[in-house]
Image (cartoon, rainbow, N blue to C red):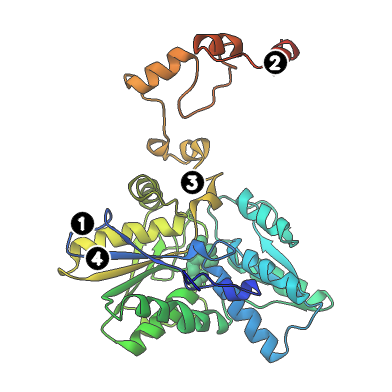
Amino acid sequence: MKTSNLRIVRSLREAIGRTPLYRTKYLSKNPSVEIYLKLEFLNPGGSIKDRTALGMIDQAEQDGRLRSNSRIIESSSGNTAIGLAMLAKSSGYHVTAVCDRHLPATKRARLSAFGADTVFLPDTPPGMDTVELRIAIAKHLADAIPDGVSLGQYSDPANPAIHRKTTGPEILDALDGRVTAVIAAVGTCGTISGIGQAMKAYNPAIRIIGVEPIGSIIFGGEDAMYHIQGGGLSFIPSILDRSVIDSGIKVSDASAISAVHLFGKSDGIMVGGTGGLVLKALADLSEQSPDASVLVGIIPDAGDRYLDTLFDSDWLRRHHFSDLTLMPTSGDPLNDTVTDLGCSLNEIPSTRGPALDDLCSRLSVRVPAVVGKFLSASA
Ligand SMILES: Cc1ncc(COP(=O)(O)O)c(C=O)c1O
């Protein structure tokens, strides 16, 4: 007899979507305003872009643009290419991602683990939007290479369509249609356009709010550098459906990164930078919303994609976010006791620390035989 609703999937295509809506109690500045987060990092490839990859592959197969042996060449800040690479192998496609050199190491590792190639641009200034250049390179390669296909997430209607068909209805279903506003970060604008179309078709009063980093121009303003990866753009993508968007909010890098760090500590969830944009927007909106509002935010991916940036203390210091680094606190009894033992708190110092045999004997722990060999080898 079935004791749970655990499901068997015969292909990763079936494992995409149906992500949970998490009710956070710590973010809302008005206790009567409910905030739910759609945890898209729980998709099998680790981001909302698994849906985009699935939608675009399905459509291209139906149109006959993809055949076995096709080489998919896609400009990506990492997540879409990861979704494509995850799904491609079992269908006989090969994926090449076109990325800039600031691609985080964890995304790069996933691409190579899934057998994808990555084409890197020449060096570009950190924080520069390289999307137009990457799209042009992907098109050039797709034209030049036999069996090359560029799906083009910025212009492919299959991108918003999958959100209209899955992400939007999942939110309405989970909350029985009780939604006041949905807040999503914008990049290709596939997420916001597709969810917006689904929400407006159900109830035109549901507000659809986009968030972008300051320096992105989708909701106006001057093109400038920003460090939040995945969100923001220096041009207007053709799939953007402005008719379903009520307003656009701009958030600074510092506010988004600070929201990411605060949320890890309050809720135990490590979100990526665009999740930080959404969290900051939600916290502000909860203050301005009428009582009993229900706000839904989309969390596109997890923070462990950004270990070498948003969660790296050197990177944070270099980019003037030093207040977010977790430094040892002098005066804290934990720090004093840890230091007294010769251990270190939160950071690994360049010195080796006290001899291991001294530490073992001080704590009345048997000194393992390998310790002797380790100490004599490194003496
Ligand atoms: C981490 C992350 N967040 C948000 C987005 C924006 O979503 P969309 O492209 O659907 O606008 C992207 C897009 O690549 C992304 O990678």
Query: In which quadrant of the rendered view does residue 79 lie?
Result: bottom right
Q: Nearer the viewer, residue 209 or 206?
A: 206
Q: Which mark is in front, 2 or 1?
A: 2
Q: Residue at x 63, y 76 (%)?
A: 152
**Disc 2 within 8 angstroms of ligand 1 (CB):** no
Numbered label attached to residue 293:
none
Residue 248: image location, x then y, percent: 34, 70
Task: Name which residue lies at 42% across and 78% down.
Answer: 170
- Let me know if residue 120 appears in the view: no
Q: What residue sits right under mark 4 in the picture?
A: 34
SS class, disc 1: loop
Q: Is mark 3 within 8 Å of ligand 1?
A: no
Residues at badges 2 and 4 in contact (C-beta under 8 Å)?
Answer: no
- Queried on whether the Cβ of the residue with tag 1 lies below 8 angstroms from ligand 1, the answer reads no
Q: Earlier in the sequence, mark 1 or mark 4?
A: 1
Which is closer to the viewer, label 2 or label 4? 2
* Label annotation for residue 29: 1
Mark 2 vs mark 1: which is more N-terminal?
1
Instruction: Choose the circle earlier in sequence order: 4 or 3.
Output: 4
Q: Which residue is mark 3?
A: 310
Looking at the picture, which amino acid does disc 2 mark? Ala
Q: Secondary structure at mark 3?
A: loop
Circle 4 residues within 10 Å: few <14, some 14–19, many ≥20: many
- Of pointers 3 and 2, the one earlier in the residue sequence: 3
Q: Secondary structure at mark 2?
A: helix
Is residue 264 placed above or below 232 in the rendered structure?
A: above
> In 3D space, how far apart are the residues under numbered discs 1 and 4 (Cα atoms)?
10 Å
